[in-house]
Image (spheres, helix red, strand yellow):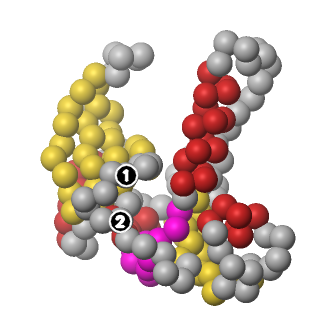
């Protein structure tokens, strides 16, 4: 996961650098996460956040797979994965369970979060609480770039992964 964060940082830094050509194109397609419990992750992303499950199954991690370097997985290690779509993007999220995947410790600093927009923050918060996920306080703010107001809430997902869920105010 740290490699993905570093890659994201390098790509976003390059994309915003003054030396980047005007024709450069960067598109983040699919965040990929490692979780300690795929079943819990499916419940969270499908039943709480409202993602659609595209596929759930085992991966055969063969020698030469990019997953080996990206997630420090041994070739042949048992890996379960799920692919999710959002209402605006197919295959928007890849979640993977690997042997020994650690849960986040609340005392540790988080290296990344996911930001998810919803049309009904109250419903997402209610579902998160119903399923026993930690819900932080809600905060209202105004976007510096657009002037739009929004409300946001942090929710700790499976294994303690942080998701910032927001809704534009009407």
* Farthest-out residue, left: 137
> In which image quadrant can residue 167 be found?
top left
Quarter of the image that includes the N terminus? bottom right
Residue 74: give its label: none
Depth check: give the residue in front, 19 or 82: 19
Depth check: give the residue in front, 94 or 18: 18
Rendered view: 157 above or below 145: below
**How far from the left and from the top, in percent, is residue 81?**
60, 75
Badge 1 crowding class, 10 Å Cα cut-off, few under 14, some 14 to 19, many 20 or more, is few
Query: Disc count in the image?
Result: 2
Q: Confirm whether the magenta stretch covers residue 30.
A: no
Marks 2 and 1 close (CB-CB < 8 Å):
yes
Rendered view: 112 above or below 73: above
Rendered view: 27 above or below 68: above
Separation of residues labelled 2 and 1 (CA atoms): 8 Å
The secondary element bearing badge 1 is classed as loop
Quarter of the image that includes the C terminus? top left
Badge 2 crowding class, 10 Å Cα cut-off, few under 14, some 14 to 19, many 20 or more, is some
Identify the residue shown where x is 34% and y is 47%. Answer: 164
Rendered view: 9 above or below 147: below
Residue 110: give its label: 1
**How far from the left and from the top, in percent, is residue 155?**
28, 56
Q: Confirm whether the magenta stretch covers residue 35.
A: yes
> In which image quadrant can residue 98 be found?
bottom right
Residue underneath mark 2:
104
Question: Which numbered disc, 2 or 1, marks the residue that appears first in the sequence?
Answer: 2
- The residue range painted magenta reads 33-43
Residue 63 lies left or right of residue 41; in this view the side is right
Identify the residue shown where x is 38% and y is 60%. Answer: 161
Identify the residue shown where x is 73% and y is 18%. Answer: 20
Question: Is there any visible trace of residue 56 in the rendered image?
Answer: no
């Amino acid at each position: 996961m740290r490699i993905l964060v570093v890659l994201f940082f390098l790509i976003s830094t390059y994309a915003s650098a003054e030396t980047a050509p005007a024709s450069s194109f960067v598109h983040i397609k699919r965040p990929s996460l490692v979780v300690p419990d795929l079943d819990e992750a499916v419940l969270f992303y499908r039943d709480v956040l409202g993602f659609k499950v595209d596929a759930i199954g085992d991966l055969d991690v063969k020698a030469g797979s990019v997953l080996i370097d990206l997630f420090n997985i041994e070739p042949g290690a048992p890996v379960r994965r799920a692919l999710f779509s959002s209402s605006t993007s197919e295959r928007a999220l890849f979640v993977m369970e690997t042997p020994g995947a650690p849960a986040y410790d609340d005392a540790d600093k988080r290296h990344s979060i996911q930001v998810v927009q919803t049309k009904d923050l109250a419903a997402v918060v209610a579902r998160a609480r119903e399923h026993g996920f930690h819900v932080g306080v809600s905060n209202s703010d105004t976007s510096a770039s657009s002037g739009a107001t929004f409300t946001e809430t942090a929710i700790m997902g499976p294994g303690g992964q942080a998701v910032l869920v927001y809704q534009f105010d009407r």
